[in-house]
Image (cartoon, rainbow, N blue to C red):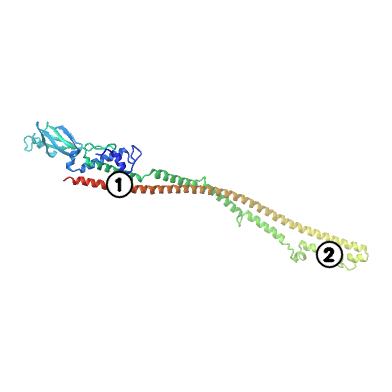
Amino acid sequence: MSAISFELQVEALTGLTIASSSTNPTQAQLSTFLTDGATEIINLLPARLLDLCAASVSFTSGSASTLNTGKVLRVFRSDGDIKQPCRRVTAGNKGRYSDPEDMNYATITDPIFFIENNSLDALPVGGSCTYSEVAYPAVLYSASSIAIFPDEAEYLVALYGAIKSLQCVLGNTVSNTAIDTTAFGAVVTSVANAEDEIEDGAKMVANIVLGVAEVTESAVDTDTGSSEMQTAADAINIALDRIATYNWEDSDTFATGSAQLTRVKAALDNAEDVINSNQPSATTDAYGAQNNEDIELLQGALSIASAEIQRAKTHLSEWSSILQAASTEAQGFANEVQSRGVWTAAKAQVWNGYFASAAAYAQAAQTYLASANGYLSEAKIRMERDAQIYQWYEKQQVKLQQDYEKGIQMLLGARA
């Protein structure tokens, strides 16, 4: 018999803390384990120790007594002077033992008992009877001893309670709130948030779709095959080709054909001829007339030269106008290309904005996923710690189980 409560004994054996609630096991559960342990041990006790677990029950034969257990040690019926031991018979033959004409008729000196439907009765009827019934005690966690129980087996009850308490802990280790609810719950939340950032049509996907639409629209405007920008660029080339037609290094520009510069040159040549190139003769050009002091011829030659110079100016002005028109046209198309370039640049800012927004949602998703990985790491650490604790409890449970079985074997060995 120990002066220490079974709860304290179990806590010392297991290292557990047991309370009325929020522990594994609770005090109520420990009481159940202790009660089950006492029941198991009683079922294994040798016959010489069963009387230490039995209680006497009185009844009157003919009025059956309800049994609490299946272990009945002995039954007596008083014959008026002494308690006569009762023989056990099967319930199916009770009628024969109650028939005075039957050779098996039970007498007050040779009474019988039988068990039927969880009740015990004796014959002959009307006698004062007692029987010894093994009782299975209810063992509270706060108790330090068991009243109707052999003292030499009480420590086994504490061992049994410790074993079952450790099994309770091992069973609950697979369900860790800090892991299942807190860590894994946070993982699920973070992943859900990441999915929301990625899949929500009003967020990342919508921005990508809008960005692609802007890029597509800009691509149509800048496509090298048929866009309006390409049309304007081609028009610039046409205008510049018109200017390039007048090649300053091409003698044909000045000497052949009907190009404006050819006409300018022809007019200037004519003017030079009548001034100092012996046209129509050495004495009739402007210099000749001046030398000869022929004022009339001089005025006529200068008049012709002035007219040719004026004609050259006219052709030169016409050529300049053509160049100016081509340049203006080219500049206009260039301005259009530039405007469309500015428009495309603006579009680029728009689609970059959409893509940047989508990237922000993607980054947010990455942040949530990183958070999920952090919680997974936490869960892993907790699981590793739980595994260590589980292994320690498991080893301790095995040791206690060995001690318990050794104690049981000692009790069984004492049967002899």
Nearer to us of marks 2 and 1 is 1
Kindly identify which residue carries mark 1. Answer: 397
Return the x and y of residue 224 as percentages of the image width and height. 61, 57
State the SS at label 1. helix
Which quadrant is home to the N terminus? top left
Tag 2–tag 1 contact (CB < 8 Å): no
Q: Where residue 84 is drawn, which disc sits there?
A: none
Q: Quadrant of residue 282?
A: bottom right
Q: Amino acid at mark 1?
A: Gln
> Which residue occupies 61% across, 53% down?
221
C-alpha span from label 2 to label 1: 129 Å
Instruction: Name the residue beneath numbered marker 2.
Output: 270
Image height of 146 relative to 241, above or below: above
First-in-chain label (2 vs 1): 2
Q: Where does residue 170 sit, x and y in percent of width and height? A: 33, 45
Q: Is residue 259 visible?
A: yes
Q: Position of residue 338 (x, y in %)?
A: 66, 53
Residue found 63% across the figure and 54% down from its top: 229
Q: Which residue is rendered at x = 53% and y = 49% of the image?
A: 359
Can residue 61 be seen here?
no
